[in-house]
Amino acid sequence: GPGVLEHARDPLENKLATLEETLFVIQAKDEKNKNRTTGGDEFEVAIKLKVWEEGADEITYRKVHGVSVEDNEDGTYLVRYTAQEPGEHIVDVKFLGTFGGAKGSVRGSPVVVLFDDFAARSNNQFNGKLCIAALKADVDGVGEWCSATLAGLSQPVMESDKRVEKGTWTELREMTALAEVKGL
């Protein structure tokens, strides 16, 4: 969700609005990396504002209060928070090791999220332009991957490969080889 979209793509445009609730969803995984379908997992979500005070020798961090994690009882967890001040916020999500899982930061965490007093309030919502743009970029990336994969699969087997006799690859044999590559 918008509450964890990093500003790296376009730091001038990808800002969330201060004083407006934003959110994101955590999807719990099992030991086989499959989506969990029940609740009860425990997460710690820490959000801090990066602060550089004039005359200070180092950067400090100020905790954002009022972060809530709602268990949807389906393996997903809705996180809500409101940044009170503009600037860089560090969002760090840790899994606490329930159900025998390994404790630690979830994949992709921590992230840096920019907040601004003048950003559009709709940026903080799932249907706002930031989420839509991120989704479009992800779909475009999947489309490019699919096109490249199809192009690779469509290449004829090299005749110089000693294991293949010229002209012996039937459609069934190609499908079988593909299934073997995919581990089916």
Image (tube, rainbow, N blue to C red):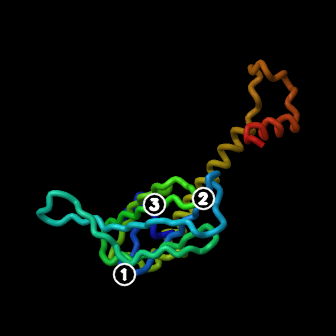
Density class for disc 3 (Cα within 10 Å; few <14, some 14-19, many ≥20) is: some
**Which element is circle 1 on?**
loop
Distance from the alpha carbon under mark 3 to that under mark 2: 13 Å
Closer to us: 61 or 100: 100
What is the x, y in percent for residue 40?
58, 69
Q: Which quadrant of the view contains residue 155?
A: top right
Looking at the picture, which amino acid does disc 1 mark? Answer: Leu
Q: Quadrant of residue 75?
A: bottom right
Q: Which residue was labeled with disc 1?
A: 19
Q: Nearer the viewer, residue 76 or 137?
A: 76
Q: Does residue 8 appear to the left or right of 143 in the view shown?
A: left
Q: Residue 135's quadrant in the figure?
A: bottom right
Name the residue rendered at 32%, 65% in the picture: 88
Q: Is residue 177 above or below residue 14?
A: above
Q: Pick whichever, 61 or 149, lies toward us.
A: 61
Q: Classify 44 as above or below 68.
A: above
Residue identified by numbered label 2: 29
Q: Position of residue 91 (x, y in %)?
A: 40, 64
Earlier-in-chain disc, 1 versus 3? 1
Task: Mark 2 vs mark 1: give the one in front.
Answer: 2
> At x 64% / y 62%, what residue is drawn?
36
Labels 2 & 1 near each other (Cβ < 8 A): no
| Mark 2 → mark 1, Cα distance in angstroms | 32 Å
Instruction: Please report the residue visible at 55 percent of the width from the left and 55 percent of the height from the top.
Output: 101
Image check: 143 left or right of 80?
Answer: right
Residue 94: mark:
3
Q: For this view, does 58 lie left or right of residue 121? A: left
Please, what is the three-letter code of the amino acid marked with disc 2? Lys
Residue, x 62% and y 73% (percent of image)?
73
Spatial CA span between label 1 and label 3: 25 Å
Mark 3 or mark 2: name the one nearer the start of the chain.
Answer: 2
